[in-house]
Image (cartoon, rainbow, N blue to C red):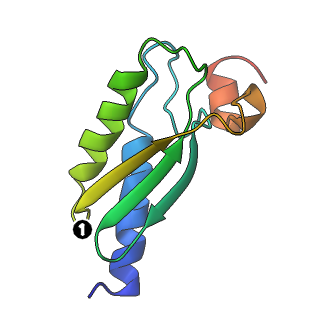
Amino acid sequence: MMTPEQILKVEQDIVLTLKNIYDPEIPVNIYDLGLVYDIDFEPSGTVTITMTLTAPNCPMADQLLEDVNREVAKIDGVEKVDVILTFEPIWDRSMMSEEALLELNML
């Protein structure tokens, strides 16, 4: 059984990991880009990440999903990763963090 501190550490590690995965077409990580809609970590070790893409026909979709699966699975405490791809709601620039907007000179 994981302690609340261990659960918090895993959740923080998941966010840090997602902040190191970049959309190949945009020089901003997928977390700050607003592509990650939800992260649900269960103490059993299962993490479910609900995310989207900047466009439904993104040519790098498979690679991006594979990167998320592979990198999050490396985190201590994570036993299983489920990535759910959704287009509801459709992504737009309002979902980007202030850091991402600054990086792309959109602020």
Residue at 52 percent across and 25 percent down: it is 28
Q: What's the residue type where badge 1 is placed? A: Gly
Residue appearing at x 29%, y 76% in the figure: 44
Residue sitting at x 42%, y 61%: 12
> In the image, residue 63 lies at what x, y percent?
33, 23
Query: Quick one: SS at disc 1?
Result: loop
Count of residue discs: 1
Q: Which of 86 and 49 is in front in this view?
A: 86
Relative placement, left or right, of 70 versus 25 is: left
Identity of the residue drawn at 58% across and 38% down? 86
Quick one: 90 or 10, which is closer to the camera?
90
Q: Residue 13 appears at what percent x and percent y? A: 36, 58
Q: Position of residue 95 (x, y in %)?
A: 71, 37
Above or below, 1 relative to 95: below
Instruction: Give residue 55's position: percent from left, percent from top.
Output: 61, 19
Q: In this view, does 73 lie to the left or right of 35?
A: left
Q: Mark 1 points at which residue?
A: 77
In the rendered structure, the answer to whether residue 86 lies left or right of residue 44 reads right
Image position of 71 with respect to 58: above or below: below
Quadrant the C terminus occupies:
top right
Q: In which quarter of the image is the N terminus?
A: bottom left
Is residue 64 depicted above or below 72 in this figure? above
Q: How crowded is mark 1: few (under 14 residues within 10 Å), some or many (20 or more)?
A: many
